[in-house]
Amino acid sequence: MGELDGVHLVVYPARDLGAGIEAWTAMLGRGPVFQNADYATFADGGVEIGLSRLPWVDHPLVFFKVDDVEKAHGALVASGATALVQDAEGVLHSGGGTPASGIVDVPGRRLAVLEAADGNLVGIAQDVPVSW
């Protein structure tokens, strides 16, 4: 397929986000570069480490870097992956028939999580300029 360009981010579950931030700060020797009520990100060279307290993050999730999230998302759906969307309670479910469903914009990137044909979750991430 050629759309995925290396590991960009690994997100770990953190039901107690404060304790997770404290543990990873101690391990990495620096605090998060971004944090909100549900998520924190640590920059560690080329691969970022994320912590999420959202219920669907129940095991580590790898996000692959892509140049064009919409193109990569479409290619993954065409290969048999299912587009996923997050509801208000933070639960993932099938995005239906819309190929671009589930692509979200967050500060500095566009993201999507899909369920591969084998049942594993796959994340894709495109960096975008940040305009604060």
Image: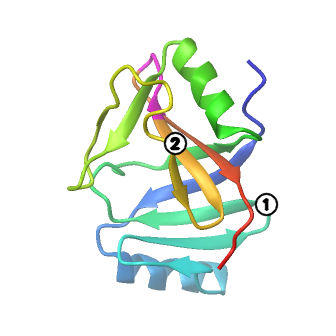
- Left or right relative to 66: residue 52: left
Disc marking residue 112: 2
Residue at 35% x, 30% y: name it. 95
Residue type at tag 1: Gly
Image coordinates for residue 46, horizontal then vertical, percent: 79, 60
Residue bearing the label numbered 1: 46
**96 to 23, vertically: above or below:** above
Is residue 117 rendered magenta in the image? yes
Few, some or many residues within 10 Å of mark 2 (<14, 14–19, 20+): many
Q: Nearer the viewer, mark 2 or mark 1?
A: 2
Question: Is 120 on the left or on the right of 78, as rendered?
Answer: left
Pick the front one: 29 or 67 = 67
Which residues, given as a range, are shown in magenta?
Answer: 114-118
Who is closer to the viewer here, 86 or 6? 86
Between the residue at mark 2 and the residue at mark 1, the CA separation in whole angstroms equals: 20 Å
**Colour mode?**
rainbow
